[in-house]
Image (cartoon, rainbow, N blue to C red):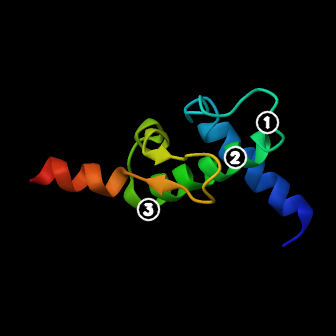
Amino acid sequence: MSILHVNQIASKIKDLFEDKIDMMDVGPNDKEIENKLLTRCLAAYAIYNSMGCSRNDAATSVVDGGDDNGIVIQFIIRLLQDKC
């Protein structure tokens, strides 16, 4: 995959989710702000694409502590809770 493709994907997921992703834990001067946004957008897209939910539901399902090297997606847990 070329850098052109990577940039196109990054642009698309940002268009879909940037205004919906919670970035409250990331400071405005954080050197990793763009990377953190993109990884959260990608996680939201994975939920949106696989679960058929709204973009807002997918975005609000993404939880990230910022410096723990991982992202938690809560959508499946909420989906199961709604069915029980």
Q: Nearer the viewer, mark 3 or mark 2?
A: 2
Residue 15 position (above or below residue 12): above
Residue drawn at (44%, 54%) of the image: 73
**CA gap, disc 2 to disc 1?**
9 Å
Rendering quarter of residue 58? top left
**CA gap, disc 3 to disc 2?**
21 Å
- Residue type at mark 1 is Asp
Tags 2 and 1 touching, CB below 8 Å: yes
| Residue tagged 1 | 30
| Residue tagged 2 | 36
Residue 11 position (above or below residue 18): below
Classify mark 3: residues with Cα within 10 Å, few (<14), some (14-19) or many (20+).
few
Q: Nearer the viewer, mark 1 or mark 3?
A: 1
Tags 3 and 2 touching, CB below 8 Å: no
Classify mark 2: residues with Cα within 10 Å, few (<14), some (14-19) or many (20+).
some
| Of callouts 2 and 1, the N-terminal one | 1
Residue drawn at (72%, 29%) of the image: 27
Badge number at residue 50: 3
